[in-house]
Structures are given as structure tokens and as C-alpha cells.
Amino acid sequence: MDYKKFDNKIVLRLKACDKIIESLETVAKKENIRACHFQGIGACNELKIGLFHKGASDYDWKTYNEDFEITSLMGNITIFEDKPLVHAHITCARENLEIIGGHLSEATCSLTAEIFIDVIDGEIIKKHDDEASINIMEF
């Protein structure tokens, strides 16, 4: 993983075997990011994505081990229980160009990934909402 900072923007380049969520968390801690939005593209070969059903207590997770083109990665980093929380969604294309996507638990970069982070000057806190069974932003 390598990254470079440009004012309130960070360009993050992942290498083979780098984990996307773990890398974003590392940058957030190093740069003391308290709120941001990010987007990216690249390739991965290990992928765990999920879908949250209303009223459920956890995501319905699916794990894939095959080559994917990351056609869209987007999300945000906020603060939850005084630590950076990465919330990401991903869309990937399979070899036959079939698309799959969902809430990203983790993905392992197979070649490279390019992620652009737009840091917000401020802090956004997330707290658990028991009624909805999810973490929600508070302003």
C-alpha cells in the first residue's frame, strides 16, 4: 500500500495481497481522518460482500474466490466508538462480465486498486440505532 496526500485529498494505491478495508482503516488512523468519502477501481480475487435485511441482526454474507474487476468501490469513513469506521459498497465484474455487488466486508487486491479519498474538514460520528439494528450518522 502506498498513498500520497494533496491538501484534503488522498490517493491510495493498493498492491497485490493488500486488503481494501484494512488499508483504508490504516490510512484513516495515520492521517487522523474523522470524516471522508472515497471511491475507487481495481481488481480483487477474494471478496466478502453482504446484504442487510430489515429487522435482521447481521448481514447475509457471501464469500467469493475468483478474479474480479472492481467496477465501482465507494463509501465513507466516520467515527464509531472513537475509532475509524469504514462503510463501503462494491460492484465487481466476473470473467463473463456478470456483475455482483453489495456491502463490502473485505476484499483482497489481486493486481492493483486506485482509491481517491476526499477528506471532510470535521467529524461525523456513527452510533448504533437499536430500532433499525444499524449504525447511523449523527450530526
Image (cartoon, grey):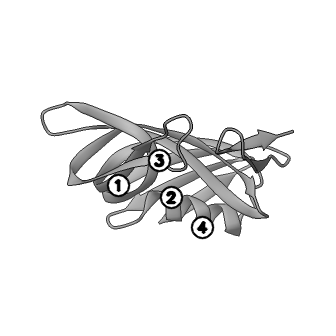
Nearest to the eye among marks 3 and 4: give it. 3
Alpha carbons under labels 3 and 4: distance apart: 24 Å
Describe residue 135's horizontal placement relative to residue 44 as left or right: right
Which residue is labeled 4 in the image? Answer: 26
Badge number at residue 59:
3
Residue beneath the point at 72% across and 41% down? 136
Which residue is labeled 1 in the image? Answer: 112
How far across and down, in percent of the image, does residue 38 sit?
Answer: 59, 42
Alpha carbons under labels 2 and 1: distance apart: 14 Å
Badge number at residue 21:
2
As drawn, 99 above or below 108: above
Residue beneath the point at 51% across and 65% down? 22
Residue beneath the point at 20% across and 30% down? 98
Marked residue nearer the N-terminal end (3 or 1):
3
How far across and down, in percent of the image, does residue 17 sit?
Answer: 33, 67
The quarter holding residue 106 reads: bottom left
Marked residue nearer the N-terminal end (3 or 4):
4
Describe residue 84's horizontal placement relative to residue 63 as left or right: right
